[in-house]
Image: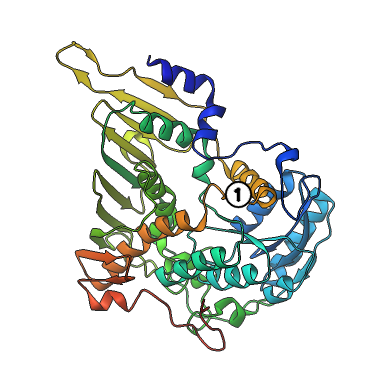
Amino acid sequence: MNPSRRNFLKKSAIAVSALGATSVIPSKVWSSEIAASDKINVALIGCRNMGFGILKHHLDTGMVNCLALCDVDKNVLKEKYKLVKKDYNQSPELFADYRKVLERKNIDAVIIGTPDHWHCLIMVEASQAGKDVYVEKPMSNTIGECNIMVKAANKYNRVVQVGQQQRDNKVFLDAMQLIKSGEIGTLRKVNIWANFNYGLGSTPKPDGKVPNGVDYDFWLGPAPKRPFNPNRFHGSWRHYWDYGGGLMSDWGVHLLDMGIWAGDLVEAPKKVITYAANLSKKEMQRETFDTMNVVFPKDNYVINWDMTAGIQQGPFDSSYGVQFIGENGTLVADRHKYHLYPEWDNDKKAPKVEAISFEKGRESHRQHVDNFLECIKSREKTSCPPEVGRAAALHAHIPNIAARVGADILEWDDKNNQFTNCDKANELITPVYRAPWKLPEL
């Protein structure tokens, strides 16, 4: 085994630090308006599944007070309040309007767990109010909103963590160290796949009455006015362009982030070659695609994306994963394990590298939250700052736009913020907000 790799595998904390990921910062080196010994006061805006899960990870650290819960669904608010009281003995104030939360001077940071179409507006207003922000991925629902959010974080000097928690996942940290130390040789290609049943959408349901306790107009917010339909609401909104981008902007953001991280890239794709269709269970209610293949040519390697909703199997007997192909070997990883498969050296009649495996990985939300809280006190960049969140989001948004406008090849000029070969695609860069909501201008 390569000595540097052996040392890395035995002393992963050193490697993690080298990659700029989560590390324990002694309290004596913390320097900000929040003392190292102080608890951080947080509020959760958008309290259902993912948002509440992230709040729990914050509370589990013992470093946090939850001062406020905010949601447009009173039923959700009551349920989550009871859980916070029962499990953490804290009694947050309850709000239906996030703007009232942002008025609270004693709140240091907000967690944004809303549907994607709300991310930008809340993040910008939170930054203007002097709050640090943990925002779920994708960073926003459009390219234009991503651009605004990066500007806001920099203009108002806020600590922002985008919820791409694989940036703090031991498996992928190890994988990046192996790749960047040259263990697999020159990186040639990254193959990424994601196959999940939920990408098919939902069984059709008619429009109906807004549930009791729900402020549906506020839930829509800047999105177009639509009749209430349960399939466009809790749990399945992601299948509609007004609010999300389907499987592509969900798992795609997480996994494509690994493909660009491997090349040390923090940039939008310059070109995408896209095939997309709805091929399975066409009677299901959805706007987003169930099948996509996308090629992302990079200067020195290529990323391939393969998505098939409605099935749960894939390469290497895994429903999702990332295959890093190098000249010396291929490294295959998911959130829980990785395996390095050596290439054969014909001259030496031996493998070019030693085969290795790691199978004790775990979810990394807690580590991602730890990093956020540490950075609030140190005022350092998080492991997934807005620039990184934007790059990953655009690797999902641009193929989605290509598929929506029927562009097999779509070319993006990031400097001038425009597509150069499709005027129709340019119409989807920035959303038109429904009055009275206004797209932030910075």
Relative placement, left or right, of 237 versus 408 is: right
Picture layout, residue 329 above or below residue 307? above
Relative placement, left or right, of 9 versus 32 is: left
Q: Looking at the picture, how far across and down is residue 342, in whole percent?
A: 28, 22
Picture layout, residue 422 above or below residue 112? below
Count every numbered label the image shows and give the total. 1
Q: Looking at the picture, how far across and down is residue 116, in whole percent?
A: 51, 66
Relative placement, left or right, of 260 versus 110 is: left
Which residue is at a point 50% across and 30% down the rendered structure image? 15
Q: Label 1 sits on what residue type?
A: Glu
Q: How crowded is mark 1: few (under 14 residues within 10 Å), some or many (20 or more)?
A: some
Q: Which of 199 and 263 is in front in this view?
A: 263
Label 1 element class: loop
Picture layout, residue 153 above or below residue 316? below
Q: Looking at the picture, how far across and down is residue 78, in whole percent?
A: 76, 65
Which residue is at a point 73% across and 60% down the rendered structure image? 108
Relative placement, left or right, of 269 versus 204 is: left
- Where is mark 1, residue-wise? 380
